[in-house]
Image (cartoon, grey):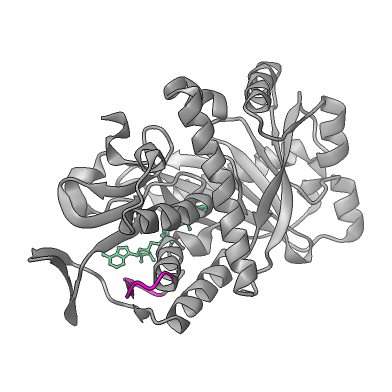
Amino acid sequence: MTGALIAQTFVRAGVSVVLVERDLIGRGSTAASSALLLQEPDRGLKQLTERYDARRGRRIWRLGQEAVGELVQTLRDLGIPCGLAARRAVYHARTRLAADRLRQEFRERRRAGFRAAWLSAGELRALAGISGFGAILTDGHAQFDPYRACLGLVRSAVGAGARVFERSTVTRINRRPGAVRLYCRSGSLDARHVVIATGYATPYFRPLVGRFRMYRTYVVATDSMTTSQRRELGLADVMLWDTEHPYHYVRWAPHGRLLLGGGDRRLVPGQRQVATFTAATAELRRHFESLWPALSNVRMTEAWDGLFALTPDSLPYIGPHPRYPRHAFALGYGGNGMTFASLAARLLLEEWQGKTSSDHALFSFSRHA
Ligand SMILES: Cc1cc2nc3c(=O)[nH]c(=O)nc-3n(C[C@H](O)[C@H](O)[C@H](O)COP(=O)(O)OP(=O)(O)OC[C@H]3O[C@@H](n4cnc5c(N)ncnc54)[C@H](O)[C@@H]3O)c2cc1C
């Protein structure tokens, strides 16, 4: 998705673009994504304000909102059929203590001028059918089919002149005078610049690897539910996530199916993946059945997992690194890959056009040096 968005943004700005993909387009974490297009970063506004300052925390939040708006607009303008739909999001607290903290976050958002409503326990039950101690309700989010969106974006980029090479692993990148040369098994190509959009730093960029913590995240999908099953559940057509660590989230998918996700686990090299997968997805199911007991009568038809990378402040790295001239990076999104992929495309194009601003510093490698 990141590569697709960057390719399409650059080519439409008149830049000559080649997209080089190890496997097939859209089959990485993009295909696994549950594609909640949330305006909100993993870290709350209060946390970011405390970590940086009010100006920077608010700006990061504002950029998240703009990034979602821009991605939605692009998908609409290009007419990409990907089930795009606007959604409200409910961010809820399951304990009294968590609700107290969430209320502080709510106040911080209101102070900063972000639109949000507080849901009491009763209002949460009425909207989502669950018990809890309160929630923040926001609008302006969206959901879509990430794979179809990604293919549509690449198709649009190709229509505008981009070239795409699939099944082409880049194994080495050398510096040339005024250029970089990328090597694949079947050939090489020269470019003025290269953007690395591999999700996280691969072993090739060894000095950067330590900046990313790798997690496995899980999704379980239910069978189509009947109208009466949906009524019994009591969950309106909203996206729902919680304040727990690791967090859990839910959204409706087409044909009355539910996507239940989260329960992230740190990647442990050498750990038996099948056993971890079975345990993690069973735990996910138990968690959601405790929220909606009626779910225990609903068949789960699919489960899958995927990798994602977290940086120390849960924000991505977008931009250059002094060790790698003529490279730009767009990596490490945590749970908000779609939102930040959209932001990366915009910031990297601005950088390419020589229009750097304080926004770029917010996501630079040097921000917490
Ligand atoms: C289960 C799951 C659920 C998620 N849910 C959400 C969600 O609800 N909302 C949200 O915003 N985000 C979500 N995410 C995150 C989001 O899916 C990703 O961050 C987003 O798709 C951006 O992906 P990407 O393009 O950066 O990475 P990827 O889709 O992984 O693409 C990276 C590509 O780089 C290629 N590559 C790697 N090495 C090389 C090489 N040497 N040469 C050439 N190509 C190479 C890979 O083959 C791959 O196709 C989720 C992720 C997972 C796994």
Q: Is residue 292 visible in the rendered structure shown here?
A: yes
The foreground one among 33 and 225 is 33
Indicate the position of residue 284 as horizontal and vertical percent values. Answer: 61, 43
Relative to residue 332, is residue 175 drawn left or right? left
Q: On screen, 130 above or below 237?
A: above
Q: Main secondary structure of the magenta part?
A: loop
The foreground one among 132 and 119 is 119
Relative to residue 214, is residue 116 drawn left or right? right
The foreground one among 210 and 176 is 176
Where on the picture, by quarter, is residue 289?
A: top right
The foreground one among 168 and 291 is 168
Q: On screen, 18 above or below 329?
A: below
Indicate the position of residue 63 as horizontal and vertical percent values. Answer: 52, 43
Q: Residue at x 49, y 37 (%)?
A: 60
Indicate the position of residue 29 as horizontal and vertical percent values. Answer: 45, 59
Q: Residue at x 23, y 44 (%)?
A: 208
Indicate the position of residue 155 as horizontal and vertical percent values. Answer: 49, 79
Q: Quadrant for ligand 1?
A: bottom left
Q: Which residues are magenta?
A: 13-24
Relative to residue 9, is residue 78 drawn left or right? right
For residue 15: magenta?
yes
Relative to residue 323, is residue 343 drawn left or right? right
Q: On screen, 76 above or below 211?
A: below
Q: Residue at x 50, y 78 (%)?
A: 156
Q: Residue at x 36, y 51 (%)?
A: 355
